Image (cartoon, helix red, strand yellow):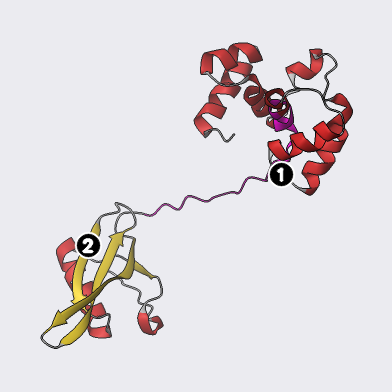
Amino acid sequence: MAISDELRAQILRYHFVERWRVGTIASQLGVHHYTVERVLSEAGVERERQRRRRASKLDPYRAFITETLERFPTLTAARLFDMVKVRGYTGGPDHFRHCIAPLRPRRPREAYLRLRTLPGEQAQVDWAHFGKLTIGRAERPLMAFVLVLSYSRYPFLRFYLGASLPNLIRGHVEAFSALGGTARIALYDDVPRNIIVVMCRPG
């Protein structure tokens, strides 16, 4: 079960700073003690239950479970329980599910870089399609020119009949007129004709 970063931080703080035991942390935060042990294990803390645990019905099958999960990391606990039960395991499914949770291989965490921009530095530009508009006997594509300031997330939106180059330029002129200035850089996502424009402040 995935937990939030905030809950993970609370578990680590109560363990390292307050010196609470696993059971105390679990009861106060309303989570299962296996969840607490998993968080501490991922942080490099020796599992408290491993230091004082007694023999378990699952012990003879741990090697098989670990090997199976390494080959099939997404295998469900129910399927794995059936496989172990056929091999002689006599424990219950709930206890089994909690016992194998720490044995599952963990996917490496992906690193994300939060991009920050200065006011007026960058704007993001794109077109949005809103179907077709019937004018007389003709059908015209209804397109929305969208410009969003990266720093404040302030949006500008204006509808045009098509995503032609004149409408693209008109959208920039009207957007910067409404905003009272231009962004230093404009970023585009799949703009027709691969147009790339860099907007610079005058002077």
Residue 100 magenta:
yes
The prevailing secondary structure element of the residues shown in magenta is loop
Against 12, residue 121 (above or below) is below
Identify the disc placed on residue 90: none
Name the spot of residue 115 as percent of width and height, x first: 45, 53
Relative placement, left or right, of 22 versus 156 is right
Name the spot of residue 150 as percent of width and height, x first: 34, 57
Quadrant including the N terminus: top right
Q: Residue furthest bottom?
A: 137
Residue 68 or residue 16, whichever sits in front: 68
Residue 183 or residue 66, whichever sits in front: 66
Whether the residues at callouts 1 and 2 have beta carbons within 8 Å, the answer is no
Q: Which residue is mark 1?
A: 75
Q: Residue at x 52, y 18 (%)?
A: 29
Q: Residues within 10 Å of mark 1 (few under 14, many from 20)?
A: few
Name the spot of residue 178 as percent of width and height, x first: 15, 64
Please tell me whether mark 1 or mark 2 is closer to you in this view.
1
Residue 29 or residue 178, whichever sits in front: 29
Q: Earlier in the sequence, mark 1 or mark 2?
A: 1
Q: Examine the image and state in which quarter residue 197 appears.
A: bottom left
Relative placement, left or right, of 83 versus 18 is right
Q: CA distance from mark 1 to mark 2?
A: 47 Å
Q: Residue at x 24, y 81 (%)?
A: 162
Q: Which residue is mark 2?
A: 156
Against 173, residue 16 (above or below) is above
Q: Which residues are magenta?
A: 97-117
Which residue type carries mark 1?
Leu
